[in-house]
Amino acid sequence: KNSSDIRIVACGTAMHAGLFGKYITEKLARRPCECELATEFRYKNPIVGKDDAVIVISQAGETADSLAALRLAKEKGAFTLGIVNVAASSIAREADNVIYTRAGPEIAVASTKAFTVQATVMTLLSVAIALESGKIDAETAKRITSELTYELPEAIKIISGDDGHIKKIAAAIAKSENAFFIGRGIDRYAAEEGSLKLKEISYIHSEAYAAGELKHGTLSLIGDGVPVIASACDRALYEKTKAGLSEAKARGAMTVFVSPADICTEKDGDFVIALPCISEYIAAISAVTAYQLLAYHTAVMRKTDVDMPKNLAKSVTVE
Ligand code: M6R
């Protein structure tokens, strides 16, 4: 609440959870908040000092670059907070304070439940900062907290129960060599995470774009049958994202639209994943669950090793 700048640093999926935190902190708390890769932060002599807060997110708590970023932030006098899954790991021990995500052991290399709880904790933290700074009232904070606590787990159960539908979409994607994920606002960060998951375990080349950026270059890559997957959890941006997806459709793309059930229709894409009707932050976290399942089924169909994708380690403890 009292720090001048809020910085979030992390790697990979944890960084995407950080982007959720940045977005919600800026939106709800009206505080500038930067989120960046630990791999970059540690080498750029970051402008961070004793009045600032640096939040380091890490499932393992041992990621070499995230740990180095934490040590650098401490050296510069910043208040440091670790958001960590593995108890007593280096980041948990060395940060000034720690919030444990308590997801339980995550075995597969691809981060899944760790992401869900990291994004949840970042949302809760943003809500707390907004409440403490008087930018939202107690009722709003209570509503979002209750959605995270009760509605998000329900939504995830419902989405996982609709696995057969996601499997059909995976079958349509599995033969592709390229895929694109798009979204605006918070959906942009869901797109980043969906794209990482798909490429990490299925080896399909995938990129994520802010939906409005398609026309600034990427549309030239869209041709017949190329999967373009869009999420529109932010109701205010729904029409815009839908229009972006239609542009891709007009160029021959195979489209998948992910959006709350009360606003989407079957016509919104070649395939539609209707999410339980919840607010944008929670819906966006649950959209990532749908993306995780999509990546999983696609990888199984492509016969790749879902748990241990090639060339990757669960915990990157060296540079
Ligand atoms: O343990 P960490 O959260 O610090 O790991 C960071 C990344 O290496 C990790 O999230 C990686 O991107 C995942 N394999 C992605 O699924």
Image (cartoon, rainbow, N blue to C red):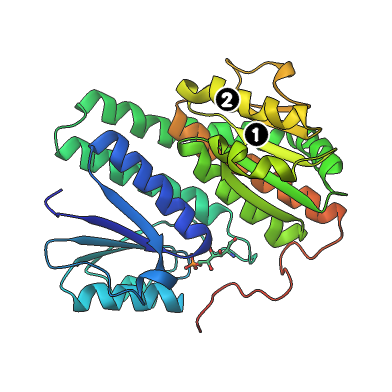
Question: What residue do we see at 42% from left, 50% from top?
Answer: 19
Distance of mark 1 from mark 2, alpha carbons? 8 Å
Vertical comparison of 214 with 116: above or below: above
Question: What residue do we see at 69% from left, 40% from top?
Answer: 219
Lateral position of residue 150 relative to residue 163, left or right: left
Q: Which residue is mark 1?
A: 159
Residue 248's image quarter? top right
Lateral position of residue 281 relative to residue 239, left or right: left
The number of discs equals 2
| Residue 318 horizontal/vertical position (percent) | 51, 84
| Residue 195 horizontal/vertical position (percent) | 64, 50
Find numbered disc 1 in the image and state the secondary structure of the residue it sits on: helix
- Give the number of the disc on residue 276: 2
Vertical comparison of 31 with 207: above or below: above
Lateral position of residue 186 relative to residue 293, left or right: left
Residue found at the far bottom of this picture = 318
- Give the number of the disc on residue 288: none
Question: What residue do we see at 79% from left, 48% from top?
Answer: 297
Question: What residue do we see at 54% from left, 35% from top?
Answer: 212
Q: Hey, what amino acid is under mark 1?
A: Ile
Vertical comparison of 61 with 139: above or below: below
Q: Decide: marks 1, 2 in contact (CB < 8 A)? A: yes
- Front-lying residue, 22 or 124: 22
